Amino acid sequence: MDTRVWLTHLLRRNLVSIQLSTIARGVSPKVYLAQEGVTRICIEGYPRSGNTFAVLMFHRANDVHIAHHTHCTGNVARALRYGIPALVLIREPVDAITSSVFALGRKSVDGEVYRYLVFYRWVESRIDSIALAKFETVITDFNRVIDQVNAKYGAGFDYIQDLDEATAHVKQYLHQRFAEGEQSERLSWVPTAIRNRLPGFLFGMAEQREGALRWKPIPVPEREEEKEALRPLVLGHKHIGQAQALYARLASFQ
């Protein structure tokens, strides 16, 4: 692992850097971080693992504060320290990493494989304290995910009454938020060519118009061909086998 990858990882797992990045885009860190006495559940996972979909679906049935979207094990640790239920999402590594590399660029392969390994190795070491949900379950049967959390923590979270309707509503909402007509506000002075290369955490969801094809958290047919072209890079990484073995171990807990 080179120095660049190591430094990037430290920034991404450090809650201080997470707080600074949220402040930079005009959002209070309290929106995303687990807060003692306020937060009811923490939902985290490696990027492109159904994080946005899961948070929106959970909110459909439970109007509570959710810690989410730091993609940082520190937020999960914080939740566990406060006695807050922690739901971690996991997706097959080649699919998840390829999708993330598509958003971040070809040069990110090494860093994203390492990021996946470090995140889920930490989760594996604390699996007895964490509720785990596979990507496929999240997007097809979210009530089962809620059931897993309730069973794990003895919680009483409500279920979604009409799962099909809720799923359609969330997808439509995401389509609208990433629509071509959205106007960018933050960093609007930056040329489009540069904006498209900046990491998504610098922008709010409605401010990622130029990068919508890369960052949209639901399937987009137009990007599948480009993503498939990146799969050999991910499959050929020297540590992808470790990531696949780690995923298989964690998936066995389902």
Image (cartoon, rainbow, N blue to C red):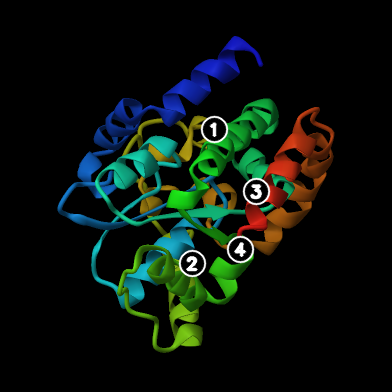
Looking at marks 3 and 4 on the same chain, the residue that comes earlier in the sequence is marked by 3
Marks 1 and 2, the one that precedes in the sequence: 2
Q: Is label 1 in a helix, a strand or a loop?
A: loop
Evaluate if marks 2 and 4 touch, with contact meaning CB atoms under 8 Å apart: no
Disc 2: which residue = 175
Query: From the viewer's perspective, is the residue at label 4 or at label 1 nearer?
Result: 4
> Mark 3 is on which residue type?
Ala
Quadrant into which the N terminus falls? top right
**Furthest residue toward bottom:** 162
**Residue found 32% across the figure and 79% down from its top:** 158
| Amino acid at dot 2 | His
The mark nearer the N terminus, 4 or 1, is 1
Spot occupied by residue 52 in the image (x, y as percentages of width and height): 45, 58
Q: Which residue is mark 4?
A: 254
* Disc 2 to disc 3: CB gap under 8 Å: no
Q: Position of residue 100 (x, y in %)?
A: 61, 42
Q: Nearer the viewer, mark 2 or mark 4?
A: 4
Query: Mark on residue 96?
Result: 3
Q: Quadrant of residue 166?
A: bottom left
What is the distance, in whole Å, between disc 2 and disc 4 at their CAs? Answer: 31 Å
Residue 116, x across and y down, in percent: 61, 37
Name the mark nearer the viewer: 3 or 4. Answer: 4
